[in-house]
Image (cartoon, grey):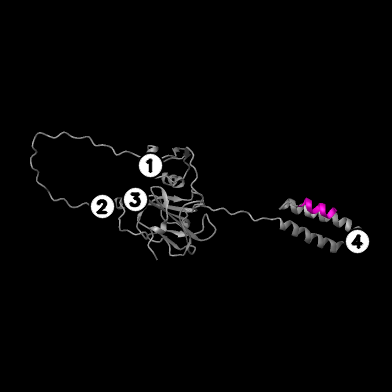
Amino acid sequence: MLLNRTFLGAGGVGLRGLAACFAGVKAVCARSEAVFRRPVKIVFLLLSICLLGCAGGHRPAPVFDRYNPAEKPPPYYIVSAGDTLFSIAWRYGFDVQRLANANNISPPYVIYPGQAVQLKERYEAPSRQPVKSKATTVARPVEKKSVPPKVPSRSAKVAAVAGDERWRWPIKGPLLRGFVATGQAHKGIDIGGKMGEPVRASRGGVVVYAGSGLVGYGNLLILKHSERYLSAYGHNRLLLVKEGDSINAGDKIAELGDSGTDSAKLHFEVRIDGKPVDPLKLLNRR
């Protein structure tokens, strides 16, 4: 009876359960020593049974997917140090330009710690140009001068990504996990690789976020390729570029790592108008 009561009382798992087990062993051994005069064998026997009973009730801790479906946004977001409007839009699945419109924030979208950002979008209607009245006087012909053609700036090239530019694989490793649009969403793809392996820009653009403020991504880079296209590179060991840097396709931008995850791999995402799309539909086949 005493043995049964002892194990029933030690049904918990962890330190409390073990403490109860050993307390029961001590009590049983005290009585057993007086009756059977064989304390050593009884101690080892009961201790073994007790530990097996306690271990049998242990359950492994659940493991949750780091990439959960987009959380329902609150009305406001209070800006913290390291945040950018791009990282806030990325977190809640907004188009950064429409988010900026809703908050009357003009390019280059500078925000400050403590600032309240409304988490909503607003479409801007194109402004109409005033119609000028036709002049009644006839203008004198102006002699045309040859003007050298303007060379587009690097920022202009980024703003209008070439239509024939292909998306490159950022690393050459195997595909570990694909894109999942519904249910327990996985908003990008995971690519395996070696620790420290070069991570390269999939397409030319500008770095709009470099940091570790987004939970589940580790050290993260976000590149802006056009007004509609963004790409992200997560779990890096080391970031080699900073916000504002102009990047060419194939440039080394980071070193592969395991920050924010359990193994060395790259998490790669592409978003169009703030919405995640399957990168495999954009990347060249290999």
Q: Earlier in the sequence, mark 4 or mark 3?
A: 4
Q: Earlier in the sequence, mark 4 or mark 2?
A: 4
Q: Position of residue 216 (x, y in %)?
A: 51, 52
Left-right relation of 134 to 179: left
Q: Could you give the CA–CA distance between mark 4 and mark 2, rounded to whole angstroms?
A: 97 Å
User: Could you classify mark 3 by the number of other residues whose Cα lies within 10 Å: few (under 14), some (14-19), or many (20 or more)?
Assistant: some
Q: Nearer the viewer, mark 3 or mark 2?
A: 3
The amino acid at mark 4 is: Phe
Can you say whether 40 is above or below 89 in the image? below
Q: Earlier in the sequence, mark 1 or mark 3?
A: 1
Image disc number at residue 122? none
Query: Which quadrant does the C terminus fall into?
Result: bottom left
What are the residue bounds of the magenta stretch? 1-10
Q: Position of residue 144 (x, y in %)?
A: 11, 47
Image disc number at residue 36? 4
Q: Secondary structure at mark 1?
A: helix
Q: Secondary structure at mark 2?
A: loop
According to the image, label 2 marks what residue?
152
